[in-house]
Image (cartoon, rainbow, N blue to C red):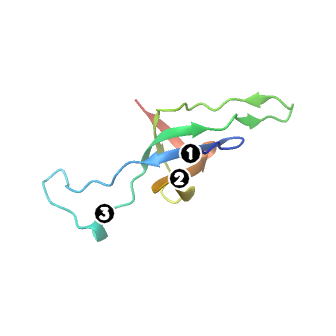
Amino acid sequence: MKIQPLADRVVVKVMEAKEVTKGGIVLPDTAKEKPQEAEVVATGKGKVSDEGKTIPPEVKIGDKILFGKYTGTEITVDGKEYLILKEDDILGIVK
């Protein structure tokens, strides 16, 4: 099954939470923070301006992005978890 987001929506696959800190401490599942980094897997056609023109999204498939901690809608498709975000919720692209 494929997902085609509408308008300025973006579908992302969230990166796994880190299991070991930089100091080498292994974290249990209950102590892991929700990751804020993801990879873009699908984009909508873009936002429609007041003049009726479509503004394409700045992100593209394959981009690694940062997003706000409590944004988006979690979905599960074919046993895989994804997050649907508005493009405005994306904080930046990781280069």
Q: Secondary structure at mark 1?
A: strand
Measuring from the top left, give residue 90's x and y in whole percent: 54, 43
Residue at the image point whose x is 51% and y is 45% from the top: 12
- The crowd level at tag 1 (other Cα within 10 Å; few <14, some 14-19, many 20+) is many
Q: Secondary structure at mark 2?
A: strand
Upstream in sequence: badge 1 or badge 3:
1
- For disc 3, the marked residue is 32
From mark 1 to mark 3, how far is it between C-alphas? 23 Å
- For disc 1, the marked residue is 11
From mark 1 to mark 2, how far is it between C-alphas? 6 Å
Q: Amino acid at mark 3?
A: Lys
- For disc 2, the marked residue is 83
Which quadrant does the C terminus fall into?
Answer: top left
Q: Secondary structure at mark 3?
A: loop
Foreground residue, 50 or 39? Answer: 39
- The crowd level at tag 3 (other Cα within 10 Å; few <14, some 14-19, many 20+) is some
Where residue 51 is drawn, which disc sits there?
Answer: none
In the figure, residue 44 lies in which quadrant? top right
The reply to whether callout 1 and callout 2 are in contact (CB within 8 Å) is yes
Measuring from the top left, give residue 42's x and y in whole percent: 57, 38
Taking 70 as reference, is 56 above or below it?
Answer: above
Taking 53 as reference, is 36 above or below it?
Answer: below
Q: Amino acid at mark 1?
A: Val
